[in-house]
Image: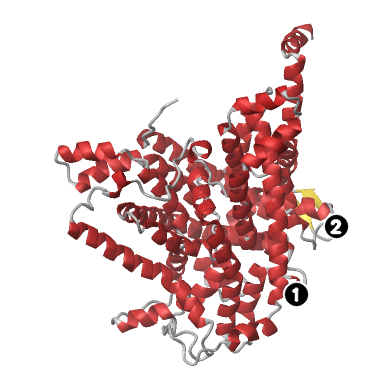
Amino acid sequence: MATVDPGLVAPAVPPVRTSQEPARRRAPGARSRVGRAVVWVCLLLITALFLYPLVWLVTASLKTRGQVFDNSLLPSPVMWENWLTVWEELPLLNWLWTSFAIAVLASVAVAVSSSVVAFGFAYFRFPGRGALFGLVLATMMLPGAVTMIPVYLIWKELGFLGTWVPLWGANLFGSAFYIFLQRQFFLGLPRELFEAARIDGAGYVSLFTRIAMPLAIPSFVIVLLFEFQASWNNLQGSLIYLNAGSVESFNAPLGIAYAMTKYSPTAGGHGDYQYVMAASLIVTLPMLILFAFGQRYFIEGIATTGRKG
Amino acid sequence: MASTTAPTARRRRRLAPQARREAIAGYLFIAPWLVGFLVFTAGAMAFSLWLAFGRYNLARNDITFIGTANFEGLLTDPKVATSLGNTLFYAILAVPLEIVVALGLALLLSRVGRGAGVFRTIFYLPKMTPAVATAALFFLLLNGNSGAVNRALRAIGIEGPQWLVDPAWVKPSIVLMSLWAVSGTMIIFLAALRNVPRELYEAASLDGAGSGRMFFQITMPMISGAIFFNVIVLTIAAFQVFDSAYLLFWRDNANSSPEASLFYAIYLFQKAFRQFDLGFAAAMAWVIFVIIMLITLVQVRVGNRYVYYESEN
């Protein structure tokens, strides 16, 4: 698949280079051998610190109830059965499916709608375009708390409470961050490309579907990945719109919260935190897989929009 | 009447049929956003403002106008002040630390050549870990008596604090979790650092400048735009801190939770969706909105004095 051409996507913030240029390999301060060694030792220590919680999560999910808190990274015995038992103990499959389905709906809806709107702002000339785009940018700064309650009442009035719709429906109308990202990309496409197609008799819709979108697939993927992760992570929305149903109807965030309480000794559990760790690992895995395949898109996306996932 | 229609007519005449078709198509393309903006942003904000001056009745699903009673309620409810204080404290602690740690990591990464990609991937993994999993994980790691962190500290002779129980350590614990997932900020710094022209350092080193001077006289000014951006975004995020604190302390509506963990967004959520006091919660939302706006404004004012923009246009 083609990579995002940095020149097209990022006029404001430079892209992250995936490979270093030879001229830049010798950075200031790292010239001496000692300096280099210090940098590497620091990096390795910090890496260990950052990686430790995740490694610990994996090993804790394989421990017995009595050992789950300890620092050993080599559980003995290795309780592989924890990974099986947790599927019986908790309706994990339901949670994963709910999260997955909503994330797919949310990300596809927002990616398509934002692309359409972005193309409107990038290609067409119309009165008020600058002011309206300024409004798009302004909504990025709006704290979610201000609209959270009225939006809840809107979904309530429309009769969508208790359904998945409130968790993805608003995505049909585009989202400021993604409109900004896609518009940047479209602006980088040479206008002659479109003018030539116009002369050949292409309509406005086919300019978008036949020329702009096929070229914008890399940044389209960035939007899909970002929104998938955001939806997978959405705790507050899940608490508002999914929490009233049965445990089976929960999604991943509500499920883990439920598991934390279920096994907690203060709530009558036995402290089987190895199951909480196993379940946490299971809901984390899809994100790690997503990252394994889309790492480049995540990094480029952040560097170009400044988004904090 | 005539004077107002004349310019419009002229403008209309100036838009050729071709241009008019293009403008109409443009409006149609942005129509989804426009509708969404009118309903979910502008409409919602207006509704929320009205709600802030009313009392919502859950059973009847209607709103009674009660004037400024909600805002007076904000002043008399001690939990509002507590949660606002907690949030401010958290923001003041979290934002500078996040900036320093993210910049430090980015500086380190910018100094290793080939290996940078691997480290960047590792630093990014916590960011991919869902907030619930992070909370569950740190819930165990930071357990005061048997948690892994305190066990490790004990091994080197330090008695660690009761992270999630001691009111003094609740907020630092949440900051610790946010620092673990700081890589988004780091990536932005990394991009900014890579964009600093090498020639500047070469010229400075010919003039005999040390690395400390180069950092403060070249690197800092050249990446000041990225610092400015990150401070604003992180501040806005810090004022809305919710996930980790909610999961660790407030998921069961327990009364035993330390008050030090009651953040503004959590109290707002409880008021709105546990007690369904929607008017009060809407008033709370407007107060935090105005506070965030004012702080951002001050930051922009201060920032404009110090930020170096390469191309002013």
Measure the C-alpha gap from mark 2 to mark 1.
30 Å
Q: Which mark is residue A248?
A: 1
Front-most of residues B137 and A156 = B137
Q: Amino acid at mark 1?
A: Glu
Q: Local crowd at mark 2 within 10 Å, few (<14), some, or many (≥20)?
A: few
Left or right, B78 with respect to B309, comes to: right
- Horizontal placement of B127 versus A264: left or right? left
Q: Chain of mark 1?
A: A
Query: Splitting the image into 4 quarters, where does residue A38 fall?
Result: bottom left
x 59%, y 86%: residue: A82
Percent across and percent down for residue A226 are: 59, 53
Which image quadrant for residue B257?
bottom right
Q: Determine whether the residue tagged by mark 1 lies in a helix, strand or loop.
A: helix
Give the residue at mark 2.
B60
Disc nearest the viewer among 2 and 1 = 1
Vertical comparison of A19 with A194: above or below: below
In the picture, the quarter occupied by the C terminus of chain B is top left
**Residue B288 sits above or below residue B141 on the image:** above
Assess disc 1: are there few (<14), some (14-19) or many (≥20) residues with their C-alpha within 10 Å of its C-alpha: some
Q: How is the image coloured?
A: secondary structure
